[in-house]
Image: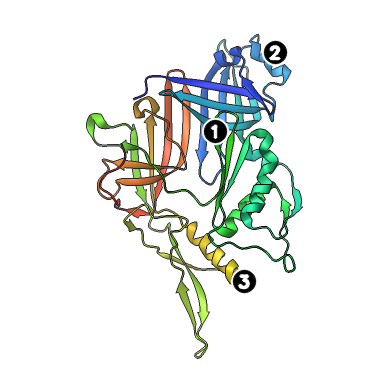
Amino acid sequence: MARSIQLLLRIGDIVTAPAPQPLMDALQSVRVTSSAGARSGFQLTFAVSKKSVITQTLLPAGLLDPPARVVISVIVAGSTEVLMDGVITRHELNPGDAPGTGTLTVTGEDLTLLMDLRTEHACYPAMPHHVRATLVLLKYALYGVVPVAVPPVIPTIPNPLDQIPVQSSTDLAYLRSLGEEVGYTFYLVPGPAPGTTIAYWGPEVRVGVPQPALTVNSGAADNVEQLSFSFDGLARTRYTVRITEPTTKVGVSVPIPSLSLLKPPLAARPAVALREEPLVKVTDRSLTDAMLRAVSVTSQAADAVSGQGKLDVLRYGRVLAARGLVGVRGAGPAYDGLYYVSSVTHDIKRGEYTQGFTLARDGFVPFADRVAT
């Protein structure tokens, strides 16, 4: 169990520095949201008055003008966790109608916003997907962005005599389109040190060392305030390809097997796919491209089981991280076991640090009887 929490806030243009003390003294609350498949964001709320340093000096000087860079970190149990490395997009001033009620709310998004501001035009002859992704990301090294691009499971290099890949979109849109072609995802992971960010382009990571288990319905051993689960029987879809039998000319729909190369199962009894859809846009593709398309759609299959909960970080003992694994115990044999943390919302106030979270899994029953504590 953690005993205390320390919040660190840095602000600047490209290079950040510790926030001025008057700004820290006026800070009322911090909210950071990190979610798989969506851009992360933050919101800072400050107490202000007509004659405060913020309204008289810091705001007129442009310290909080978009796109000022903000780095938010916390120290929990002696370990520094970078929650957000992003840029301010807007701020809202509410002077208040009584003394002590004025607030300034600063809102921003992670550094992917900088990748989505202008359309770029570029050619990438004879370059596989991961090389193109790396070249795009190298343009943001000035912000401490370190690219990590994983080669596709089925490598393909376009023949420049037949095709030259062309980018005519924002860098963010191009990175995501490259990922969709091979069943990969793209997101930023702030840290490990303030001012640095890992730009990950690759398969959704559902392996590795799980975070300490979330414990419910176990008396004094409980470390979450609330946790509930739901099952959506219509979430999963089975994809098929249409094949014509050469003799009878009869068309047959052949199901595409669920490929666990990119998305390993987390449950021993996966939910049954009730929906069925044909795999489209493959007739005019090469065999390799068609295989990549099949890998892509099967890797993006929705999770049928989800969990929603809330915890106190001081009681849990550490910061629960999104896009990682975590164990659940005490929920019963159907819902215990490992889950993927699909989203986390950090809410920090003076003397209080809570997290709302969402878990996801493909089915019921864990593979093992025990989870990491």
Where is mark 2, residue-wise? Answer: 57
| Quarter of the rendering containing residue 221 | top left
| Quarter of the rendering containing residue 69 | top right
Where is mark 1, residue-wise? Answer: 191
Q: Secondary structure at mark 2?
A: helix
Q: Residue at x 58, y 36 (%)?
A: 197
Q: Position of residue 257 (x, y in %)?
A: 43, 67
Give the colour scheme of this rendering. Answer: rainbow
Give 139 or 251, whichever is nearer the viewer.
139
What is the CA distance from the residue labelled 1 to the residue labelled 3? Answer: 40 Å
What is the CA distance from the residue labelled 2 to the residue labelled 3? Answer: 62 Å
Which dot, 2 or 3, sits closer to the camera? 3
- Are the residues flagged by discs 2 and 3 in contact, CB closer than 8 Å? no
What crowding class fits label 1: few (fewer than 14 Cα within 10 Å), some (14-19), or many (20 or more)?
Answer: many
What is the CA distance from the residue labelled 1 to the residue labelled 2? Answer: 31 Å
Query: Which residue type does callout 3 highlight?
Result: Ser
Mark 2 or mark 3, earlier in chain: 2
